[in-house]
Image: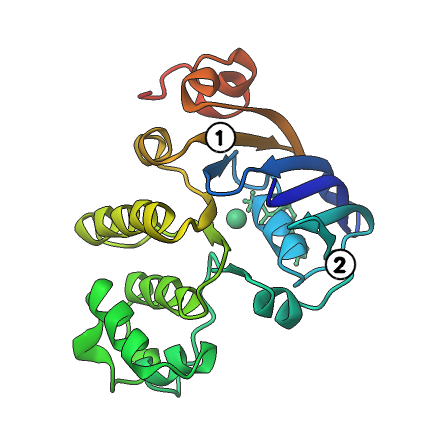
Amino acid sequence: MILEVRDVVRRFGGVRAVDGASLDVEEGSITALIGPNGAGKSTLFNVVSGFLRAEHGTVRFEGKRIDRSPAHRIARGGLVRTFQMPRTLARLSVLDNMLLAAQRPERARELLALVRLESHAADYAGVLSGGQRKLLDFARVLMAEPRLVLLDEPMAGVNPALGRQLVEHVLQLRRDAGTTFLFVEHDMDVVMEASDRVVVMSEGRVIASGTPAEIRADERVVDAYLGTSAPV
Ligand SMILES: Nc1ncnc2c1ncn2[C@@H]1O[C@H](COP(=O)(O)OP(=O)(O)O)[C@@H](O)[C@H]1O
Ligand SMILES: [Mg+2]
């Protein structure tokens, strides 16, 4: 397992955002994290990536405890993440946003071309659309050649054709570089197609995990999330 999350708790005042969540991510896998809004998915990402401290529980990356490590150290160690609301620096150029992650101009140009932002390289990141900012955030985290990438709703607000390419690129990186991905996604077609495993959160806990086919057939999941009319 490249990532082992055990009994993580994180509250905000009286809200138990993550309430004893445990999950494993197998090295080289593409794992989807699904669940209704407010289930605690983004909070769990924040804990795993070091942006929030867990009040209880442990997180191990490649066997080593990281739940007391700051975000920058975790990122340098090879575990990176994108944000549901990307944190691009509006007053820096698109290219400079990329170079903050790593001083590799050629790789930056390559990745910008991949997400169709090469013609915007010199523009302020602040002029990009919401979807383009998500693509920039995606390209940025790949600068450091990470081993585990957490993607928080990478497709939301991205036009479908580019979203399609993003999925292709995830599959290709896994195949060619062995990169592991854990991603939050609401589009069940994408989840079913791209993931090897699916983890389901509800009310701060992991309520099910399995192959896409197992999850689709799991009544607890249908009740908690998919609903009887979900097109899956
Ligand atoms: N910074 C915060 N301050 C207060 N409450 C928060 C904060 N972040 C998340 N929450 C609350 O924690 C719960 C889980 O939120 P979140 O992790 O964003 O869920 P998801 O990503 O699954 O939609 C929600 O009730 C949300 O309102
Ligand atoms: Mg979220």
Q: Is mark 2 within 8 Å of ligand 1?
A: no
Which badge, 2 or 1, comes first in the chain's sequence?
2
User: How many neighbours does mark 1 have within 10 angstroms: few (below 14), some (14-19), or many (20 or more)?
Assistant: many
Quadrant housing the N terminus: top right
Residue 130 located left or right of residue 1: left
- At x 32%, y 62%, the residue is 135
Q: Quadrant of residue 40?
A: top right
- Residue 127 at what x, y percent from top left? 29, 78
Give the residue displayed 70% in from the left and 68% down from the top: 70
Give the residue pinned by disc 2: 53
Q: CA distance from mark 2 to mark 1?
A: 25 Å
Residue at the (25%, 76%) spot, across then down:
109
Disc 1: residue Cβ within 8 A of ligand 1's nearest atom: no
Against 97, residue 210 (above or below) is above
User: Quadrant location of the C terminus?
Assistant: top left
Classify mark 2: helix, strand or loop. loop
> Which is nearer the eye, 88 or 171?
171
Percent of width and height locating residue 170: 34, 49
Toward the viewer: 202 or 48? Answer: 48
In-front residue for pair 220/31: 31
Q: Position of residue 63 (x, y in %)?
A: 70, 48
Q: Name the kind of residue labelled 1 in the image.
A: Val
The residue pinned by badge 1 equals: 198
Locate residue 193 relative to residue 99 in the image: left or right: left
97 or 178: nearer the eye?
178
> Looking at the image, which residue is at 36% across and 21% down?
230
Secondary structure state at the residue bearing disc 1: strand
Name which residue type carries label 2: Arg
Q: Is residue 65 above or below residue 199?
A: below
